Image (tube, grey):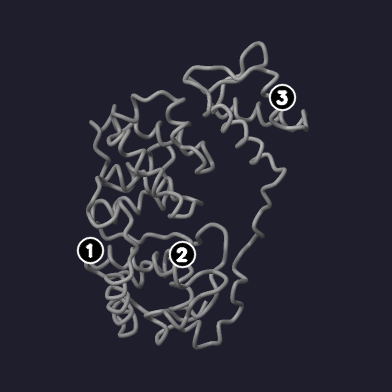
Amino acid sequence: MAQTKQAGSPDARRAQRLLAAWWEGHARDLPWRFGRTTPWGILVSEVMSQQTQMSRVVPYWTAWMKAWPTPQALAAASTAEVITAWGRLGYPRRALRLQECARVVAEQYQGRLPRDYGTLLSLPGIGDYTASAVLAFAYGQRIAVIDTNIRRVLSRVFAGVESHGGAARPADRELAERVLPPEADRSVVWNQATMELGATVCTAKSPACQDCPVNGLCAFLAAGRPGLGQGRTRPRQRFQGTDRQVRGLILAALRELPAGSVLPKGRVEALWPDASQLGACLASLDEDGLIEIEPGGGARLPS
């Protein structure tokens, strides 16, 4: 990796100023931003946004927070209600983990999200990124938030190379911490603005460099954008015919039933023509706690 700039260097300070000004005029008006929700609302938004486009998240987040505005409310909901409300967001195990997290927060922390990294990381379903995001965006703390978008922007602007895919490496964290503003309030804006830039301008395959507020400082652009788009470690997976599609069909059918109802065996079998694949998907959903299989072969959402 090329030599990177320190947080106090002229280029880093200028980038911080330029991105802060850009954020003021270009930040998307998402309902969990700009102090309009609670720390719990921030956490819900971050969990929902994992591997999911923000535009899809907004209506689900809005309905979810109306139904369960606090950890205590979500903890008291039935599993069937939670899975139904998760709808088509994808990766529905996230919904179960979020409810597990709510129960721990309600029972052990009086419904208040912890304010320290280690305790947040100990909660069900909470990893490094989510813990860091809550501390920064909910509590205004100075901490490096590292997601795919932020890694891409920082790698391109300050190191002049394309970001790799996969999990974050120690070098990614070192770079993020080097260029993080020293003041807590400015560091929060920096994290938000860098993430937003990566999501909307400095995209993986087709960055709009002409619209980038830091294009005059970008080492990647100056080098001719070497290896553009080559940081992806795996191609986008097909959906048709996959277990993910079959699992989604099963859950969609169960969500449409009246509360507590069972989908009879015959209707279950009609959901997918490959009986072997259907059976494997039913078993995996049952193992994940997302459905219950009845003795007669029917299926239902957990109570």
Is label 3 in contact with label 2 (beta carbons under 8 Å)? no
From the image, state whether disc 3 or disc 1 is nearer to you.
3
| Residue at left offset 36%, top offset 71% | 178
| Residue at left offset 63%, top offset 30% | 284
| Residue at left offset 66%, top offset 26% | 283
Q: Which residue is mark 1?
A: 184
| Residue at left offset 29%, top offset 72% | 25
Disc number at residue 269? 3
Comes first in the chain, label 3 or label 1: 1
Question: Label 2 is placed on what type of residue?
Answer: Asn
For the residue pair 100 and 88, the one nearer the viewer reads as 88
The 10 Å Cα crowd at callout 2, few under 14, some 14 to 19, many 20 or more, is many
Q: Is residue 93 left or right of residue 40?
A: right
Residue 234 image point, x, y percent? 65, 59
Does 116 appear above or below 76? below
Cα–Cα gap, marks 3 and 1: 56 Å
